[in-house]
Structure formats: C-alpha cells, structure tokens
Image: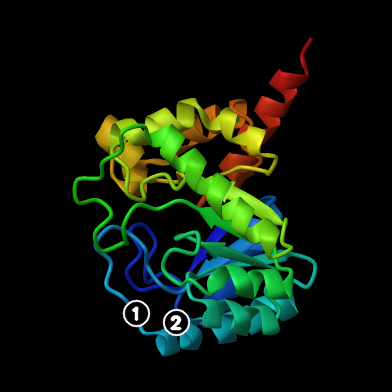
C-alpha cells in the first residue's frame, strides 16, 4: 500500500503533492514499483496535528480521487478518513477501501456507513485523538487492550453484516516506544482474529527514536521493521517507499518457502 499524502503538514512528505500532475506522477511510480493499493489522505494525523474541517478534507480529496480513478482504473484506492460523510462521498466517487485511524471512535456512524456500502474497512486502533494521543499514553497490557478493542469492533461490524475488514494495531497512535515494539513482537497473534493484518510503520518515530534518525533518513530502519512485521505475518505494508517494501516482501516470501 503506497501512501499518497495530499496534506500540507504530514510528518514526512506533507506539501509535496499539491497538484494533480504531481499526484498522478507519484502514484504511477508507486504502481510501477509494485503497489497494489494507493492510500490517499487529506488530513494529517501526526501527533499534535491541526484539525481540518470536513469541507476542506473533501476539497482536497475529490479532485485527486477522480484523477487517480481515471488514470489507474485497475488499482485499488483506499481513502484515509475517520468521517463517515467523507467516507460515503469518496465511495460514491470511486474509492474502494476506507482506512479509519480511529476504528469508529471519532465518528460513531462510520461502521454503519462502511457496512451499508459493503466497503473493505481498515480498522485501526488509536488511544485518544491525533491532538492528544502522544500525551503520556498508558495501558495495563497494550496487546490485550488492542486485541479486545478489535474483538468488540469486529462484533459490531458482524452485527451490521460486514466482514470485509483489515486490522491495523496503529503503530505510533497513542503508544510509547515499548508499546509499539510489544505490538510488533506479538503481531502474529492478531491473525487469530481471522482477518488480515496491516503494518504501518514507515519512517515513524518508533524507528527514529530508537536509531536517532529523522523521517527523511529512516528508510533503512523502516525496511528492518517492515521485515519483522512480515516475519510476524503482516499481510499489507503501508509505506512511503514501495520499491524497498516489495524487496522486503520478496526476500521474506523466499525465506519462508525454504524447507
């Protein structure tokens, strides 16, 4: 899953893609490098990010979505939003997947919307909001609490008749360094819930704090963490750097195939 940020203030590539030709060029490179999903977002969810009005989110999203849908009709397009009205608007305009950082916590109507549209739904765990999530996050048992959150949300979705779900433990979203690596270490156990698991660690602070890097020179660390996630049976990698992620996938698949 290649990240296509339409935001001016995302932590790594904010402001780089402001015009349709730039957006299409970035998407084309990702697809050529092997991306099977493009994940587009118009609201930064980095720690402390400023909230963006719904109308502005749609203003950023809809023209880009239309252009991407026309240019790449065979590629799956995911939209990163936590608002059900935005989700419905993009699904009406060609999006395939909804990627909700809040797992329905920031908009209680989201689950019903994705169920009504029968849209694949990325269910992510976040403690707090982007504005508050890194202000002393606390868990008694981070893995258990994220697992229970998934169980509860999956039950709600099943009651709505919806089972097309991808699980994302939400690395960096209301977690300390230790929380993040605990979830990474136990990532395979989320597969017992019966749904594919997504890992989104690309260039995040869980890498930078450990290696004393910055987002712009965190590619090597990202590849290492992506490889660990794959060894723990992550099915989707959400990344800024598709070519390197594909290489990690190829190595791990070959390694797992050795008897």
Question: Which image quadrant: the C terminus?
Answer: top right
Residue 1: percent from the left, percent from the top?
61, 53
Q: Which residue lies furthest to the front in this view?
A: 159
Residue 187 higher or lower than 50, as above or below = above
Cβ atoms under marks 2 and 1 closer than 8 Å: yes
Asked if residue 93 can be seen in this view, the reply is: no
> Which dot marks residue 52?
1
Question: Under tag 1, what secondary structure?
Answer: loop
Q: Which of 204 and 170 is in front in this view?
A: 170
- Left or right of 130 on screen, residue 119: right
- Tag 2 residue: 57
Residue 78 higher or lower than 201, as above or below = below
Q: Nearer the viewer, residue 20 or 45?
A: 45
Q: Which residue is drawn at 59% across and 27% down?
A: 232
Pointer 1 local density, CA inside 10 Å: few below 14, some 14–19, many at least 20:
few
Residue 137: percent from the left, percent from the top?
25, 45
Pointer 2 local density, CA inside 10 Å: few below 14, some 14–19, many at least 20:
some
Q: Which residue lies furthest to the top in this view?
A: 259
Q: Which mark sits nearer the N-terminus, 2 or 1? A: 1
Asked if residue 185 can be seen in this view, the reply is: yes
Q: Nearer the viewer, residue 67 or 174?
A: 174
Judging from the image, the colouring scheme is rainbow
- Left or right of 96 on screen, residue 125: left
Cα–Cα gap, marks 2 and 1: 7 Å
Q: In the rendered picture of this protein, how many numbered marks are placed on residues? A: 2
Asked where in the image residue 248 lies, by quadrant, the reply is top right
- Left or right of 88 on screen, residue 107: left
Q: Which residue is drawn at 51% across and 39% down?
A: 147
Residue 150: percent from the left, percent from the top?
54, 47
Q: Residue at x 74, y 23 (%)?
A: 254
């Amino acid at each position: 899953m290649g990240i296509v940020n339409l935001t001016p203030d995302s932590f790594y590539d904010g402001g780089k893609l402001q015009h349709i030709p730039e957006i299409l060029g970035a998407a084309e490179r990702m697809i050529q490098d092997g991306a099977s999903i493009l994940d587009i977002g118009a609201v930064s969810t980095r720690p402390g990010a400023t909230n963006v009005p719904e109308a502005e989110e749609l203003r950023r999203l809809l023209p880009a979505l239309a252009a991407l849908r026309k240019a790449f009709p065979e590629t799956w397009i995911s939209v990163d939003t936590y608002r059900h009205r935005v989700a419905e608007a993009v699904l009406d305009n060609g999006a395939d997947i909804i990627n909700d950082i809040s797992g329905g916590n920031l908009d209680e109507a989201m689950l019903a919307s994705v169920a009504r549209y029968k849209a694949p739904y990325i269910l992510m765990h976040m403690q707090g909001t982007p504005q508050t999530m890194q202000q002393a996050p606390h868990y008694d048992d981070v893995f258990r609490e994220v697992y229970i959150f998934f169980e509860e949300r999956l039950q709600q979705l099943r009651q709505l008749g919806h089972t097309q779900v991808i699980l994302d433990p939400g690395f960096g979203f209301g977690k300390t360094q230790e929380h993040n690596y605990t979830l990474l270490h136990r990532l395979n156990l989320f597969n017992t819930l019966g749904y594919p698991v997504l890992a989104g660690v690309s260039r995040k602070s869980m890498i930078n704090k450990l290696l004393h890097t910055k987002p712009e020179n965190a590619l090597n660390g990202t590849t290492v963490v992506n490889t660990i996630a794959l060894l723990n049976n992550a099915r989707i990698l959400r990344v800024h750097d598709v070519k390197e992620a594909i290489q990690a996938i190829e190595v791990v698949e070959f390694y797992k195939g050795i008897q």
